């Protein structure tokens, strides 16, 4: 069975709503086990076939929890090369964090990134949640292929 991690940080609950929709979409694909969590150890990243990260943007940056996960993974030499990755998140003004996450996934960890980041300004509307479900499903299906 393939394993997908939906890891997220959410202070207001908006990115958490998006994470739940991403997880729901991924769970709709058979032979895929989905874990949704707001905390994960860097060493545990190796046990997943895909890592989808939900991150809001605060002050033009990603939250420290997300940064620390990447820092720990880099320091410990965690090999994520070729694993599937994606990013999504809510924002109030600028929305850089999901792009920053993808940049780290691509350039530092050499992950496979089949989708552009998803964004929701403030609270995600129904279209944004539907897009999140579609992202989760599309990435889970890509693992099967």
Image (cartoon, rainbow, N blue to C red):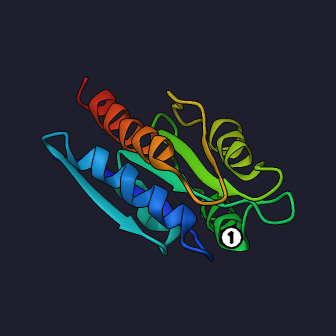
Q: Nearer the viewer, residue 107 or 22?
A: 22
Count of labels in the image: 1
Q: Quadrant of residue 59?
A: bottom right
Percent position (x, y) of residue 135? 42, 37
Relative to 58, 22 lies left or right: left
Relative to 114, 100 lies left or right: right
Structural crowding at the residue carrying mark 1, measured as other residues with C-alpha within 10 Å and reported as few (<14), some (14–19) or many (≥20): few
Q: Is residue 4 visible?
A: yes
Q: Which residue, given by chain and number where applicable, does mark 1 sit on?
A: 68
Say if 106 sits above or below 16 in the image: above
**What secondary structure is found at the residue carrying circle 1?**
helix
Question: Farthest residue toward the top?
Answer: 145
Q: Quadrant of residue 5?
A: bottom left
Say if 65 sits above or below 92 in the image: below
Which residue: 65% across, 36% down? Answer: 106
Q: Quadrant of residue 122?
A: bottom right
Question: Farthest residue toward the right?
Answer: 59
Quarter in which the C terminus is drawn: top left
Say if 63 sits above or below 47 in the image: below
Relative to 69, 2 lies left or right: left
Q: Nearer the viewer, residue 86 or 72?
A: 86
Which residue: 54% across, 72% down? Answer: 13
Percent position (x, y) of residue 142? 33, 28
Which residue: 52% across, 30% down? Answer: 115
Percent position (x, y) of residue 97? 73, 52
Say if 24 sits above or below 81 in the image: below
Q: Is residue 78 visible?
A: no
Q: Nearer the viewer, residue 16 or 46?
A: 16
């Amino acid at each position: 069975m393939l394993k997908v991690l939906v890891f997220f940080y959410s202070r207001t609950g908006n990115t958490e709503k998006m994470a739940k929709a991403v997880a729901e979409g991924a769970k709709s694909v058979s032979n895929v086990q989905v874990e949704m969590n707001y905390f994960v150890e860097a060493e545990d990243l190796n046990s997943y076939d895909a890592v989808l990260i939900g991150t809001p943007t605060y002050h033009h940056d990603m939250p420290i929890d997300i940064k620390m996960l990447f820092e720990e993974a880099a320091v410990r030499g965690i090999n994520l090369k070729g694993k599937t990755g994606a990013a999504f998140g809510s924002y109030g003004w600028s929305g850089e964090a999901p792009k920053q996450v993808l940049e780290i996934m691509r350039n530092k960890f050499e992950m496979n990134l089949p989708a552009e980041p998803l964004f929701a300004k403030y609270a995600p509307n129904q279209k944004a949640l539907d897009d999140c479900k579609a992202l989760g499903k599309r990435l889970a299906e890509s693992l099967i292929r």
